[in-house]
Image: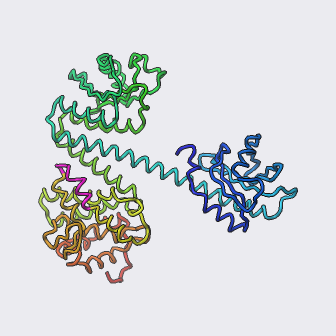
Amino acid sequence: MQPDALHELDYTRYARWLRRVTGVEHDFAVCDASGALAWAARGGNDSGGDIGSWIGARCAAGFAWACIGDGMQRHDAEDATLLYMAIHGKSGLLGYLAARVARLAEAPTAWDLLAETFEDIAAGIADDHAAKRELDSMALELSERYEELHLVYAIDKQVQQLEPGADLFQKLLQSWAEHMDADVAAFVKPGENLCVHATNLSAPIHNLDLVLVEMRGDLYRFTHSARAPIVINDVDDPRRAYIFTDLPYKLLCCPVIHDRSVVAILVLANHLAKPDFSNSDRKLGELLANQLSGLSKMYGALAETQKFNEQMANALIEAVEAKDPYTRGHSERVHYIAMQIGEAMHLSTRDTDDLFWGSLLHDVGKIGIPDAVLCKPGRLTRDEFTFIMVHPERSYEILRHIDRLKGAVPGARHHQEKYDGTGYPHGLKGNDIPLNARIIAVADTYDSITSSRAYRAGRSHEVAMAEIRRVAGSQLDPSIIKVFEDVCAAEPEWIARFNIAREAVGVAA
C-alpha cells in the first residue's frame, strides 16, 4: 500500500457517526502520521476558519502531535483547543483523529464521550485501512496474473504456429521483448553453442556484441551456480564488477532448468534510463524460462504441452475466482462432479478429455464481468443479468484461440442452455445442446445450490437434488439427471469433502 493510503479512505460516515453519538457538529479532521491533513469536515464552530488550515498553521508553528498514553490528547492554542487521538494499525502509527473545540480551563464531561467515540472511530479507520491494503494486494496480484496469462497465451500461439529450432526461440524472444518493453531479450545455451536474441530498442546499443559475449560468459556461469533469478538495477550494484563487466544496463536473468540442471539462461537487458525490473518482471521471466526449458529439450513434447495447458487453466480460474471470494473453488467442484457423471456414462477418451477442459474452464468468461455485477449481494437488475448472460460467449471467445481446447469449447459455451430451448446464448434445445454442456449444466446447477453466496448460505444436498428433479425436462436433461442420481446414491466421498450440508435422516429428499 502507498504511504498516502490514509488519504484514499472515505471518512464521511465517521463524521456522521461522531455527530450522531455526541450530538455536536464538531470541526473534525483526519491527519496522516506526518500530521498532514487527509480529510476535514467543518462543524458548527465558525471561529478559527477552516480546521485543515488551522491545524496546518499549528504544525508550522511547531506542534508535534505529542501522545502520552493511548487516550485522547489535548493541545491548547491561543484561540481554541485541539483534541486528538492516534490511529494505530497492524503496521504501527497510521495517523490522528482531531477535533477543534472552544478553549476551556477545565475539561467538560462531554469530552469523555468524545474520547470514547474517537476510540471507536480510530478502530474503524484502522480496520478500513487494513481491508484496503488487502484489496490493493489482491488487485496487484490479479494484474500480475493477467500479465502472466497474456504472455502464456502468446507463447502457446507461437509454439503452435512455428517449427522447432532457433527460429522458435527468436520469435518467442521478440514477443517477450515487446511484452516486457525490454531493449534486449536473449536465450543463451552454451552447451549447444546457442545464443539467440531479439531487440526492441528504446535507444541504440552500439556494443551489443559485447553484451551478448558477457551473457555467454560470467553471467551464465554465475547464474548456473546461483540457480536463481538475478536482478541488477542499481548502478553501484557490486555484482556488476564480476558479472557484467560494468556494462551500463539493467539486467534480469532467469535460469532455464531441466532435470535439476541449469541448461540455459533467459536474459533481459535495458538502458539505465528505463524503469527498474520489478518482482513481477522476475516472476514473468521465471514463467517463460520454465516454458523454454521444455521447448529447448523436447521442442514442445506432449508432456510439456499438457503441463502448459494445466498452468494456463489454473491461472485463468484463479484470475476469475479472485474477483469473488464466494465463488472460489466453484470451477474445481463443477469440474470434479462433471467428471464423475462422465465416468458413470462411460464416455469415450476424446469426449472425456473435452469434458475435462470444458468443465474446468466453463466460467472463464466471467473475467470480463464488472466486479459490481459479479459480486453484487442482492437481486440483479435486467441490465446486470444481461452482463451475466454474456459470460458463456466470452468463454468461447477466450478459449477458441487454443487449438488444444477446440473440442472443449462447446461444453463451456453452451452450459447455460436449457433443455426446453429457453436458455442462452443460442437457445439450443434438447439433444441439440452438446452432450458435455448438458453434463456441465447439471454439475453447475448442483454446485450453485449447495454453495454459499454473499446473500444466502449453501443449501443441503437433498434440497439441491429436489430442485434438480423439479427442473428435469425444462432446464436440465432428464437422462443425465438419472445418471447423477445414481452417482449420488452411492454416497460419494466428495459430498463430505466439499462440505455440502445434509438433512437429518427421515427428512424427505
**Residue 150 versus residue 490 in the image, above or below:** above
Horizontal and vertical percent for residue 508?
Answer: 33, 83
**Residue 119 versus residue 201 in the image, above or below:** below
Q: Residue at x 15, y 73 (%)?
A: 430
Q: Quadrant of residue 109?
A: bottom right
Q: Quadrant of residue 458?
A: bottom left
Q: Quadrant of residue 397?
A: bottom left
Residue 505 in sight from this viewpoint: yes
In magenta segment, residue 67: no
Dominant SS type (magenta): helix
Q: Residue at x 61, y 50 (%)?
A: 89
Horizontal and vertical percent for residue 111?
Answer: 78, 61
Residue 289 in sight from this viewpoint: no
In this image, 243 relative to 198: left or right? right
Q: Residue at x 75, y 45 (%)?
A: 58
**Residue 324 versus residue 442 in the image, above or below:** above
Q: Residue at x 32, y 17 (%)?
A: 206
In this image, 335 relative to 134: left or right? left
In this image, 218 relative to 46: left or right? left
Q: Which residues are magenta?
A: 392-404
